[in-house]
Amino acid sequence: MNDNTTGEKIIEVLRKAPKVALFSHVSPDGDCIGSMLAIGLALEKMEKEVTYYNPNSVPSYLTFLPGASRITQAIPNPQPETLMFIDCTDLQRVNLTMSDILEDSTVLNLDHHVSNQFFGHFNWVDAQASACGELALILIKQLGVEIDMDMAINLYTAIVTDTGCFQYSNTTSQTHRLSAELLDKGLDLASIHHNIYDQKSLAQIKLLQCALSGMEIHAEGQLAIMTLSLDEFDKCGAEQELSEGLVNHARSIAGVEVAVLLKEVGPQEIKGGLRSNLWFNVNEIAAQFGGGGHKRAAGCTLRIPMAEAKQSMITVIEEALKIGRNH
Amino acid sequence: MNDNTTGEKIIEVLRKAPKVALFSHVSPDGDCIGSMLAIGLALEKMEKEVTYYNPNSVPSYLTFLPGASRITQAIPNPQPETLMFIDCTDLQRVNLTMSDILEDSTVLNLDHHVSNQFFGHFNWVDAQASACGELALILIKQLGVEIDMDMAINLYTAIVTDTGCFQYSNTTSQTHRLSAELLDKGLDLASIHHNIYDQKSLAQIKLLQCALSGMEIHAEGQLAIMTLSLDEFDKCGAEQELSEGLVNHARSIAGVEVAVLLKEVGPQEIKGGLRSNLWFNVNEIAAQFGGGGHKRAAGCTLRIPMAEAKQSMITVIEEALKIGRNH
């Protein structure tokens, strides 16, 4: 069951299947939704009956995707024989377990995560792909379906959202070559990018304003630190998750190597998000506060008042910046 | 003198020239600097003597480009026979006139602006190219020089900066295919993007905070308007040009169709920058105030106090939004 077959077997199964149930992961993003829709639309062109499942509703910034209204939060009943999981490392990503899957099912697994669990009968896992959208495009071509505009919009969105507009280091020359094929279909780039990126809520903008107004610079410009209190979230009418990405505004200041956002999530409960640019290991700092992550992005929770948390963070990072370069 | 030869003749001239003087335009950007450096480095590989001219100093966010230190603000003296202008619509873009050019010179003109004046003896002008960097890459390959890492960094930067990371509608499938070739050289995308984009000044961030704090939403969420007074520029320690791009923060709010930034540049002198997203013609609005531009981006100057300017702008845009959809 855990063989990493290439697409051949998956193509064969899909060709034969009269009905296919597609599944994509919780907290859906542009890659899983766009890839699922493109594959589904291609299978529909092959006259198959297709269902599109996601545990959550489609985020508003993705509702423009052709076919998005086909996605439901109901597991198909009756379950068809062929089930295809897209962009999912394991069944938990779809809030399912093996017992939810009928015994005579054929499970197909298309993914690009290095941590994929090879849970399918047939697994096409390519961790070199920047997005599942790359694999979906190759799959559709191998199915012999011509990419139409609707599929192209979905696939391009999948790639663009998972690569941060081709900026992240997962972007490869293949990413660009496949995107070129999609642009050849005549995509309206301005409209796609507007739909994806120009969807900030007013609360999010207010939160940014709030975070910037309290930003402090330390360590001769190398450290930028921002804080958001519960009161401030409240004042902005913002949920906690709207602070996502705010720390990058601090990180993008010239000369800043380390950026921190401390947000109050409860009484004496401060979540710290840390980012670095070129050399500083924020994972080591987060670890000192019982957290962790990666060299350039890490997080931790401090169970002390905000003022104290901020001062501790500044002290520890200033010290590490001083000795860091000499390592 | 005004023939639009393809690259052939330009290649021939460059091959024969022992010395080449390269020129790029005032207010230099990533495209003109990156393209000039890549071409120059290629010519150096061909053992030619190359000079690199720009009327201004290289902006700090571009000083990481390999070869950037070669660029001078001194016109080469003596002038070599072969002069090549890169990304320039006309000689004025380099602060030169025909009288500055020796009579027996051969002037080469490589550009991608539709408004190019064909001022060279040989002109390679391709308005389909998203960036001059695309043409520079093709030129270097035609010269028979293998693209090395230094050239690739310059060419990629040229393309990325002129296409807004492949987001602008000037991006074509060729843009992606050429970028794929550059990525094949092993570019460090994270480092390049950090160098280009994470260079905001603290004053710029303060200005953003200031503009957001005074932002108003009108017309049931369709209009977002921001103002910046002379006092506020002063308080942030920011020059006028640092407000560049701020209006996009207002434009990127979900539901906003028109975004305006009004900035005070002198007593009773208000500059308005207008942007729209999908259908609203801001050119018509700017024209009502004696300005102009394009459908999605326009500007004007109002010689009245800020409060008055703001109210006029809101009134006129609200009215146009009401009737606009019915056109």
Image (spheres, coloured by chain):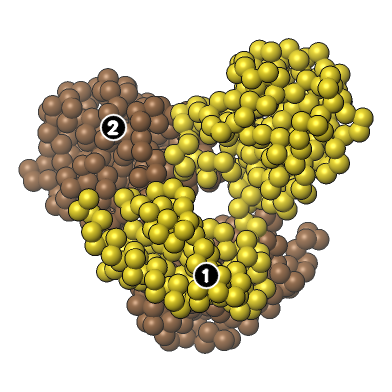
Chain colours: A yellow, B brown
Residue at 20% x, 23% y is B15
Question: What percent of the width, then of the height, locates residue B285?
Answer: 62, 68
> Label 1 is placed on what type of residue?
Arg
Q: Is residue A81 above or below residue A248?
A: above
Residue at the (61%, 79%) spot, across then down: A231
Q: Which residue type carries mark 2?
A: Met
- Quadrant for the C terminus of chain B in the image: bottom right
* Image coordinates for residue B197, horizontal then vertical, percent: 40, 53
Q: Can you say whether A306 is above or below A157 in the image? A: below
On whether disc 2 and disc 1 are found on a single subunit, the reply is no
Label 1 belongs to which residue? Answer: A303
Real-space Cα separation, disc 2 to disc 1, in angstroms: 48 Å
Q: Give the percent coordinates (x, y) of residue A188.
A: 64, 41
Residue A259 position by quadrant: bottom left
In the displayed structure image, the side of residue A129 where residue B198 appears, left or right: left
The chain letter for the residue carrying disc 2 is B
Question: How would you rate the neighbour count of disc 1 (Cα within 10 Å): few for under 14, some for 14-19, many for 20 or more?
Answer: some
